[in-house]
Structures are given as C-alpha cells and as structure tokens.
Image: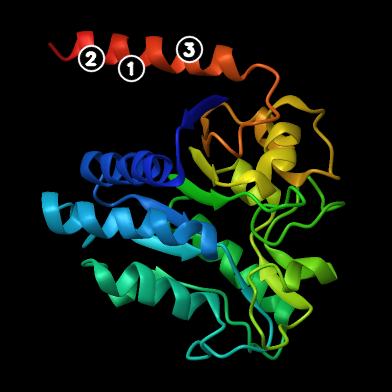
Amino acid sequence: MRVVIEPNPGAAARFAARCVAELVTRKPECVLALAAGTTMVPVYREVVALHRRERVSFARTRAFDLDEYAGLASDDPRSFVRFLREHVIEQVDFSAAHHFAPDGCAADLDAECARYETAIVSAGGLDLALLGLGRNGHLAFNEPGASLAGRTRVEVLMRPHITENGDPDPLPRVAITMGLGTLLAARACLVVAFGAEKERSAAEMIEGPVTSLVPASVLQHHPQTTVVLDDAAAALLVNAAHYREVETLRREMESNATR
C-alpha cells in the first residue's frame, strides 16, 4: 500500500487528481469507478482544472458510479448520479453514453445489482476505483460488517452514515453499492481522506488488522492501492514519518528516471 501524506486538503486533492489524469492520458479508454460525497469535491475540482489547463480528455473513458440511494431518481438533487454529473461528468468531455450508474428506482433492486455487476465485467473491469474513506471505515456503501468478498448488492445503511453529508432532507436507509470484492477486482484503487474526523479510520485502514468492522482495511490485500491523506487525517499513523520518507525517495527516483 502506497501512503501519500500531503500538508493540506488542497495538495492532497491535486495529487489524487494528477493520478487520475495520468491514467486517462496513458489509457484513454480506461474504466473508472467514481465516488460521490463531500470528500470528492476538491478532487473533482482539480480533475476539471487539469482537463481545462492541460487538455486531459475523458472522451473515451468510461465511468461507473460506486453507489446510489434506493428510491432516488437520477434528477433528485440528493442522488449520487446527479452529484457526479454536476461535479465532473458534465464539467469535462465525458460522453453521456459512457457514464453508468445503478438505478436506485429499479423495481427489483437485487436484479439491478446483478445487472450492474455484469455491466462492469462487460466493460473489461475497473482500471481505477476512486474512493473516499468514511468516518467508520466504510468504502462506497460497504458498512462495518460487510462481506470482504461481496459484489454489487443492496445495503442497509447505519443511521450516522445517512446524515454524514449534512443534508437536511431525510435520506433513504437502503442503497445499491459496489461490494468490496468488486473493488478488490479493480486493477488499482485510490483512496482519499481529509481532516481530523478521518484520522481514526485512516489509521485502522492502513495499520490495523484486516476486518469487516473496518471495511477499508481489506485494501491491505490489494497490491495496487494508493492512499492520499492530508496531515490531519494522518495524525494517528504510527509510521507516518516512514511513509513520508518512502514517498520522498520514490519521487526522487521517478524524477531521476525521467532525466
């Protein structure tokens, strides 16, 4: 697991956005899994900036939303599909036909989960899962206790989770989510976390035991996982100084290799 610690959320968001842009430039037809939520706002802002400043094109890239609340239509301002359209899909040159989301209003949610999982496989699998770390260690809507091998499925959400984004309107208690097994099948995972409220879950994810009580800890088993934190989110890491040293050496080596 690569652990990148930046001094502030802005620097961390820029690093994460650069990782996305480098993949899209290297493999324009790549398949992304995209997270919604407040953590992702500065990341997508930087992605849009790179698109405009450096002409990074997403025209051939395909994107799958990580999750969606059950019962919310795609035009509902609380839906994740609308969030992603507003913050990144419609801000760059994504093709609308290349943006996929689970249908939270499907009559048969289990059948919709199976359809969505099949669509991901049919696209060739995920090249990169872009993930935000939850305060309780969740990834997507995989709550503590979720199967570490589960695929796209229906999840009942914990009550603190549904108020986490500060939305004054009641949110559904049920959602469709990519499972941890789906994320582990991605060729790479990129996790971002900012702020002191994420310090415990970040430490448990990176340095704690692999357990379903901290769903994000399963990424310790993924060989191509990068975690991007700001100083506040990294505050409880026992080996923070080592991670910083490793990253400094890595960047020096990469810089030397390109000379």
Q: Residue at x 39, y 9 (%)?
A: 249
Count neighbours of disc 1 (C-alpha within 10 A) and say few if under 14, some if 14 to 19, many if 20 or more. few
User: Left or right: 112 with respect to 33?
Assistant: right
Mark 3 or mark 2, which has the lower sequence index? 3
User: What residue do we see at 64% from left, 87% from top?
Assistant: 106
C-alpha span from label 3 to label 2: 14 Å
Q: Position of residue 126 (x, y in %)?
A: 47, 49
Report the quarter where the C terminus lies. top left
Query: Under tag 3, what secondary structure?
Result: helix
Q: Nearer the viewer, residue 223 or 109?
A: 223
CA–CA distance in space, label 2 to label 1: 6 Å
Q: Nearer the viewer, residue 254 or 117?
A: 254
Q: In the shown orientation, is residue 178 left or right of residue 121?
A: right
Q: Amino acid at mark 3?
A: Val
Contact (CB < 8 A) between labels 2 and 1?
Answer: yes
Badge 2 density bin: few <14, some 14–19, many ≥20, Cα 10 Å: few
Q: Which residue is mark 2?
A: 255
Residue type at the position of mark 2: Ser
Answer yes or no: is residue 61 visible: no
The mark found on residue 251 in the picture is 1
